[in-house]
Image (cartoon, rainbow, N blue to C red):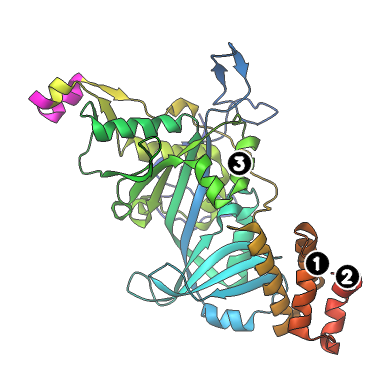
């Protein structure tokens, strides 16, 4: 089988030379392709219908991507001197990253692309380093890598290292893991191979007297995991693009759980990822191999006899017991269909659409010489999609006055002419 390799030793070889020179090899995409979903590794038999269904058992995707870059100029200076007509920058005063003082949200044509954290608060980073976190909805799009490169180029950022990578495996079968962890917490008949790994519940269904969310391990150790009902979480978060992703990747209609591993810098160091590796995170087989190797080498569950665990050492009980295949490793997808468009605006769609309109109008007010028709088209699209023409009219009057000043007239003319 052909293989591509993940860096464990940094290389500066490009232009046809293989930059993945290391000991961690991963299979290239192989196998036949089913037309509807372009994935065959997870086709399974529907036992109820007694026939083959062209559906997938799991879907897999990168759900968090954050990396450290070095910068030539302070982001604050770039923010002040920004003249790129397609890139908008919004400074956020309050955020939850304790390592950095400032947060800037980066938009391209009004679409949120990433967060850039800057100005260090402690010794976790060097003075000229920033942290870039890619927007969640972009990770489900096949073009996310292109946008990341555009941001790095615009801000003259140089990729240094990966700081966090989350890989999510979704499927109905994951809900069984939640049930297994409930049994684990109540009975001695399920054991793990490592008592140092802490397993704790995170959410409780009072009606069913059932824990429906769990954490496994601690992020400080380099690897940890979360197991929870993703379908229920989407109802709260509004991340409907994940449902679209499931549909595109052949998951049948249903209720889905998520097993999500978090790898931080301590665990990622061995891979020595480079900038070019980020593109491979859109390759299901590539991230599937990482997921499999990390989880299998980290934690195992065993079904043991209660008598053995009470009367003998744990090692003896496990030896006499049987390993639980809590994930069907042969069902992990080797191909994925990424979304062509990302329509999602994080959290509340309507509120964020209003914020995007306000932000774009403020940018026009502050930088009329750098404003473009693209900004006006963004406002028109949001106004049309969310029926906010009245809001836009009142916002224009509030910002620019009842009589639009001459220097803004040409810019805002399409809005005024269309009645928005």
Q: Could you tell me if residue 281 is visible in this image?
A: no
In the picture of the structure, the residue carrying the numbered disc 3 is: 243
Residue sitting at x 85%, y 72%: 415
Q: Position of residue 214 (x, y in %)?
A: 36, 42
Q: Residue at x 70, y 50 (%)?
A: 341
Which of labels 2 and 3 is toward the front? 2
Point out the residue furthest to the top here: 50
Going from N to C along the chain, the mark reached first, 1 or 3, is: 3
Say which residue label 1 marks. 389
Q: Nearer the viewer, residue 409 or 394?
A: 394
Q: Residues within 10 Å of mark 3 (few under 14, many from 20)?
A: some
At label 1, counting other C-alpha atoms closer than 10 Å, the crowd grade (few under 14, some 14-19, many 20 or more) is: some
Please indicate whether residue 282 sits to the left or right of residue 412 in the image: left
Out of 322 and 362, give the one closest to the viewer: 362
Q: CB of mark 1 within 8 Å of CB of mark 2?
A: yes
State which region is magenta.
Answer: 310-320
Q: Label 3, secondary structure: give it.
A: helix
**Residue 342 to residue 178: above or below:** below
Work out how far the residue at label 1 is from the one at label 2, CA to CA, in angstroms.
Answer: 8 Å
Give the image quarter of residue 303: top left
């Amino acid at each position: 089988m052909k293989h591509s390799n993940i860096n464990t030793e940094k290389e500066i070889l490009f232009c046809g030379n293989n930059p993945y020179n290391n000991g961690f090899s991963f299979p290239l995409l192989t196998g036949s392709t089913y037309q509807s979903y372009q994935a065959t590794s997870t086709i399974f038999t529907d036992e109820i219908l007694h026939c083959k269904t062209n559906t997938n058992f799991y879907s897999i995707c990168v759900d968090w991507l954050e990396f450290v870059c070095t910068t030539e100029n302070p982001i604050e200076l770039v923010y002040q001197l920004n003249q790129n007509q397609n890139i908008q920058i919004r400074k956020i005063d309050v955020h939850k990253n304790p390592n950095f003082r400032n947060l800037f949200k980066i938009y391209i044509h009004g679409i949120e692309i990433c967060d850039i954290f800057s100005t260090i608060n402690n010794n976790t980073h060097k003075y000229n380093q920033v942290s870039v976190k890619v927007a969640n909805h972009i990770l489900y799009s096949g073009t996310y890598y292109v946008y990341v490169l555009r941001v790095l180029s615009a801000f003259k950022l140089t990729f240094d290292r990966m700081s966090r990578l989350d890989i999510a495996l979704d499927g109905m079968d994951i809900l069984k893991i939640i049930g297994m962890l409930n049994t684990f917490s109540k009975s001695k008949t399920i054991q793990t191979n490592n008592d140092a790994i802490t397993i704790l519940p995170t959410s409780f269904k009072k009606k069913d007297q059932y824990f429906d969310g769990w954490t496994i391990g601690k992020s400080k150790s380099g690897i940890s995991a979360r197991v929870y009902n993703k379908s229920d979480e989407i109802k709260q978060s509004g991340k409907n693009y994940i449902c679209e992703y499931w549909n595109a990747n052949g998951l049948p209609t249903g209720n889905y759980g998520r097993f999500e591993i978090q790898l931080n810098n301590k665990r990622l160091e061995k891979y020595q990822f480079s900038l070019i590796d980020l593109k491979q995170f859109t390759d299901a087989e590539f991230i599937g191999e990482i997921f499999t190797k990390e989880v299998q080498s980290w934690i195992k569950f065993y079904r043991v006899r209660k008598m053995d665990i009470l009367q003998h050492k744990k090692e003896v009980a496990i030896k006499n017991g049987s390993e639980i295949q809590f994930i069907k490793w042969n069902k992990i997808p080797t191909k994925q269909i990424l979304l062509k468009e990302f329509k999602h605006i994080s959290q509340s769609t309507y509120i964020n659409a209003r914020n995007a309109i306000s932000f774009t109008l403020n940018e026009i007010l502050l930088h009329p010489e750098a404003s473009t028709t693209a900004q006006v088209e963004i406002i028109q699209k949001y106004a049309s999609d969310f029926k906010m023409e009245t809001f836009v009219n009142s916002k224009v009057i509030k910002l620019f006055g009842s009589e639009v000043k001459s220097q803004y007239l040409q810019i805002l003319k399409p809005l005024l002419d269309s009645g928005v």
